[in-house]
Image (cartoon, rainbow, N blue to C red):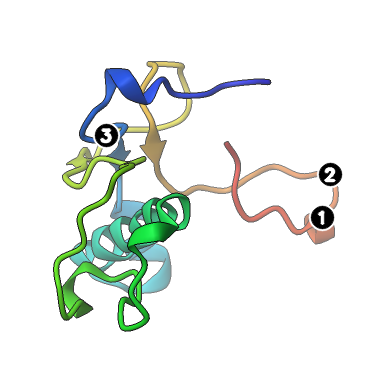
Amino acid sequence: MGVWWDLTKYPSGVPYVINPSRAAKSYKLSESQVIHEMMCALESWDLAVDIEDYYVNYVAYPDNTSSKIKYNINLFHDNPKVDYKASIGIPDYKNVITWGRLSCEDPRDGIYALA
């Protein structure tokens, strides 16, 4: 089926690394904004796979909840590492979220993310 995570090895969620520097510079955001938005996006995935704990007033942003949600499944760790040198150039077996330019034959291909 491809690459997958054995969640029994990661009871607190799969760890990941964020390198916010290029996104912050490219989009004129603070690095803390980039980190916060990535964490919220991954919390949305946690919510999607654990839908039984969904509350209507929960907007997938941890700081906007009226009550604390306890997940039965936690895909992504809630405390990512921030590493300003992390990249996707050389395989290091880490889950890295970073930004850069893709070389495409046709820029209209619409590639926005690469895994």
Q: Earlier in the sequence, mark 3 or mark 1?
A: 3
Displayed quadrant of residue 2: top right
Q: Real-space Cα distance between discs 3 and 1?
A: 28 Å
Q: Which residue is mark 2?
A: 105
Q: Earlier in the sequence, mark 3 or mark 2?
A: 3
Residue sitting at x 14%, y 66%: 68
Q: Real-space Cα distance between discs 1 and 2?
A: 8 Å
Q: Residues within 10 Å of mark 1 (few under 14, many from 20)?
A: few
Q: Which residue is mark 3?
A: 85
Return the mark for residue 53: none
Q: CB of mark 1 within 8 Å of CB of mark 2?
A: yes
- Residue 14 shows in the view: yes
Q: Quadrant of the C terminus?
A: top right
Residue type, numbered disc 2: Glu
What secondary structure is found at the residue carrying circle 3?
loop
Residue type, numbered disc 1: Asp
Whole-percent x and y of residue 79?
16, 45
Vertical side of 102 occupied by 25: above or below:
below
Which one is in front, 50 or 2? 50
What secondary structure is found at the residue carrying circle 1?
helix
Displayed quadrant of residue 70: bottom left
Q: CB of mark 3 within 8 Å of CB of mark 2?
A: no
Q: CB of mark 3 within 8 Å of CB of mark 1?
A: no
Vertical side of 7 occupied by 46: above or below:
below
Q: Residues within 10 Å of mark 3 (few under 14, many from 20)?
A: few
- Residue 44 shows in the view: no
Residue sitting at x 23%, y 62%: 31
Q: Nearer the viewer, mark 3 or mark 1?
A: 1
Vertical side of 95 occupied by 70: above or below:
below
Q: Which residue is mark 1?
A: 109
